[in-house]
Amino acid sequence: MISKRLAVFDFDHTISEHNTDIVVRDLLKPELITAEIKDVLHSGWIPYMQRIFGLLYQNGFRRTDILSAIEAIPEVEGIKYCIRELARSGFHVIIISDSNSEFIETWNNFNSIDHFIHTVFTNPANFNSEGLLEVRPFHYQTKCNLSSRNLCKGMIMENFLSSQSDKADTEYEKIFYIGDGKNDVCPMLRLKENGFACPREGYACCDALQSAINKGGGNYAAQILKWSTGKQLLSLIREESNGP
């Protein structure tokens, strides 16, 4: 059995400084997003964004316009260096995100970090023959109330760990989960004694994680490492990785 260390990253507001979907949505004039389209949110984020992508297409925005907007998003300060250094020091780095495959692949390639990423788990997407971006749910789940129906990050992380153990003969002696949002709480709660929850300071995950821990009685096996920049995050991970 091969012993490795794992860093699991969210994407929006964790690697990319901004939310990829919101950046693309904001290419549209606000008045084009009618109350009827906003009501689609009740059916979920994926149906809503599909309507947004349809609007973009109808208003003349094409593949190059959308992907150029993604490429223009800055990194979270120092996060590319952090990912490169983790991968070079033997970590497996994976991404679990409720964005989509087109956006993440585009941003990672443009920023030259794609070859440092072991695996990406996200909603599959592609531009069809007419140039319309189509996005599909990663899966459909009803077991986890902390997560959206289309993507439970905790379930994905656990399935990855099982798959690595069964198929790649790999166990992870230390696991770091890095995120910013409420949908990162589920995987953080599933971490065990060898786990480190790394919520980004100033974002919803910090308070939501603590609230969930308190609600569960305060017993939490993993350690919590709060971070603001990639440089700080790397320092925290290195400190814990070099420990016992």
Image (tube, helix red, strand yellow):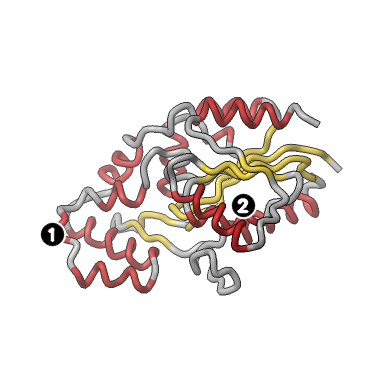
- Provide residue 6's location: percent of width, then percent of height: 68, 40
Q: Is residue 118 visible?
A: no
Identity, as a three-letter code, of the amino acid under mark 2: Met
Q: Is residue 60 visible?
A: yes
| Labelled disc at residue 196 | none
- Provide residue 171's location: percent of width, then percent of height: 79, 45
- Provide residue 160's location: percent of width, then percent of height: 68, 53
Image quadrant in which the N terminus is located: top right
Q: Within 10 angstroms of label 1, few (less than 14), some, or many (20 or more) residues?
A: few
Q: Nearer the viewer, mark 2 or mark 1?
A: 2
Query: In the picture provided, is 143 more to the left or to the right than 242?
Result: left
Check the image and name the residue furthest to the right: 1
Secondary structure, mark 2, is: helix
Figure label count: 2
Q: Earlier in the sequence, mark 2 or mark 1?
A: 1
Query: Which quadrant of the figure has residue 115?
Result: top right
Secondary structure, mark 1, is: helix
Q: Within 10 angstroms of label 2, few (less than 14), some, or many (20 or more) residues?
A: many
Residue at screen point 70% across, 47% down? 222
Query: In the picture provided, is 17 more to the left or to the right than 118?
Result: left
Residue on which the image places disc 2: 188
Query: In the picture provided, is 47 more to the left or to the right than 144?
Result: left
Query: Which quadrant of the figure has residue 233?
Result: top right
Query: In the picture provided, is 125 more to the left or to the right than 213?
Result: left
Image quadrant in which the C terminus is located: top right
- Provide residue 108's location: percent of width, then percent of height: 47, 37
Residue at screen point 69% across, 43% down? 175
Check the image and name the residue furthest to the left: 31
Picture layout, residue 9 above or below residue 78: below
Picture layout, residue 35 above or below residue 209: below
Identity, as a three-letter code, of the amino acid under mark 1: Glu
Residue on which the image places disc 1: 31
